[in-house]
Amino acid sequence: MKNLKKKSPIPSKKTKSLLGYDDLSINQLKVLASDVRSDILSVCLNNGGHLSSNLGSVELTIECLRHFDAINDDIIFDVGHQAYAYKILTGRNLKDIRELDGISPFLDRNESKFDKYCSGHAGDALPVAVGFAKAKQLEKSSSYTICVTGDSSIVNGLAFESLNYLADDKIKRLIIIVNDNGMAISQNVGFMKKQFQKMRNSKFYFNTSSFLNRKMSKNKITRKLFYGLKRIKDKVKQMVLPNNFFESIGLKYIGPFNGNDLNALDLAFKKAKLVSENGPVILHLLTKKGYGYYPAMNDKNGSFHGVSPEFDDLIVEDTKENFLSLKEKYLFKKMEDDKKMIIITPAMLVGSKLSSLQNKYPERVIDVGIAEENAISFASGLALKNYHPVVDIYSTFLQRGYDEVIEDIVRNKISALFFVERAGLVGSDGASHQGLYDVSYLKTIPNVKIYMPFDKKSFTYLMSADYFSNDYPSFIRLSKDDIIREDYPIIYMKDYLLYKKGKSALIIAIGQEGFKLIKKYFKHEYTLITLLDLLPEYDILNEIDFKQYNDVIIYDPYSTIEGTVSYLSLYLTSINYKGNYHYFSFNCEFVTHGDIDSLYKRYKLDHESVYLKINKILNYKNK
């Protein structure tokens, strides 16, 4: 990349990038965008993945790589579900993305020198980018920091805190690209406002302003005249086009520009680079989610945001019975009976299957956006005014509300109900989204109850309880499993299932995979239990009489060993258990991406591997 000339703050017309995309003509760039879009469609058709957001960000990614050096400058994508084009354009083949040992679904520092940050959750790219830019400012570096964030992520609390900080610390060469594919940040209302905005974003205005700045800054008299005229222009602008949010807190804002128009983007990036020489700048780009693929462009429900392999032009609703469908039926009935029940979700209406509920109860099904902490504290306020809050949240996102669970829920003795969805492995989304850690960290908080159903009967049993008459919160973990449909004898004994009673060894299982294991493989005389309460009170555990067994074995493929495995270990120590305790669960580590069956096999937690190990432990041969 060419350095800026000392006598002129105007970037050269041809900015040299590391990857050579700046050498392409506009027509060649259009062909490139089309090819990248085809690759994204193809890989999502084969592997599933984030489709709409990636299709919409192709042109802005191309222009970003034309105007910046992807190695010496730092380009960070918030979340990373709009970075497929970036991966392709920085030399990666996405044919095995999301597969075991394949390309990561999000940006990963361990995968490529072009990925500067491991992403996955929304809102954190902006504070990280501010940290990058601040470090480079202290080192006197002249490189740029570019943060690509979405219109939903920018309203996350972390992002707001960073914007507040930037209002005081005018860090140079920090460009915050707001990829706005839905919610308008600055309003365009009225003919004069639109015309003024159109003029500001024109090449003629930019080139004329830059030319006058360069020429009139050469001597003292003309420089004063230029800045006097600029002040008059700024006053007129404030009368015609009032400040938006960013400008009101003292940040420079340019846009909005058409984020799917290569010519407009070329001007936008030139302008952003120039303005960033004096401090951070917000570059507002309007893109179309799903751009170039008609069904995704016209999707109003988010059906094409994340797609499964072999998706069709027409999205067919999944008719398989799973915990989501069971939960939806339960909530429909409960909300009809309980007028004080209010459901809160942090931007997961579609993913948590709450859209139909919101259509029926628009005032009582509330989407707070990507603001998990707010969702939990909001629930606390509702409960303190005698309402019955249900927080529907993914396991991976509940992590962000740990403090609020402690301070606003538990310390205030709130009887909220949490549905913790996608508990256990989620598969292809990888390390940032595996739902393996909630039991381990909730276990450290006093007075919480955690349950996990394994089939329709156990879910119905758990839903028969009154969760709003307690002085503590209840967390019900729901996996992605489809429901097993077999009949079997069932005996509930204070929130655990006694499936079979025997001697010598006690085998404890958790969740549907756990129950399937003991039901399929263990027909000998062993006591077989499936825990529903994952942190049972000691008086309940005392009823099991662990001391009569030579071996206690637990199989928990939905958590790490820091969860129920650890909890049970402490209990056995407390009763001075002298037998052997064996456990099969995930170690306390990050689990990579891949399909769920392959991951179970990779980590030796598939049924066959676990059975063979238990078989060896108990020293018997299967007959």
Image: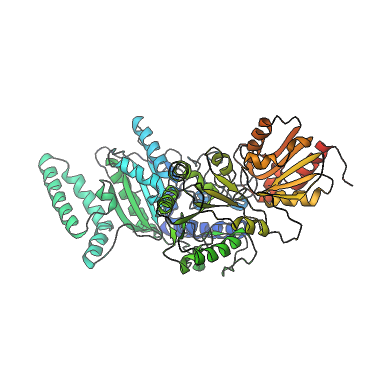
Say which residue appears at 60% left-offset and 64% top-offset: 311
Quadrant location of the N terminus? top left
Towards the viewer: 539 or 181 = 539
Residue 507 at x, y percent in the picture: 75, 43
| Residue 346 visible in image | yes
Q: Is residue 92 above or below residue 331?
A: above
Residue 399 at x, y percent in the picture: 51, 44
Towards the viewer: 88 or 314 = 314
Towards the viewer: 103 or 155 = 155
| Residue 143 visible in image | no
Figure colour scheme: rainbow
Total numbered circles: 0
Quick check: 82 left or right of 173? right
Residue 455 at x, y percent in the picture: 67, 57
Q: Residue furthest left?
A: 221
Quick check: 214 left or right of 409? left
Towards the viewer: 399 or 109 = 399
Q: Is residue 152 above or below residue 447?
A: below
User: Which picture quadrant has residue 307?
Assistant: bottom right
Q: Residue furthest right?
A: 623
Say which residue appears at 25% left-offset and 42% top-offset: 8
Quick check: 433 left or right of 605? left
Residue 74 at x, y percent in the picture: 42, 40
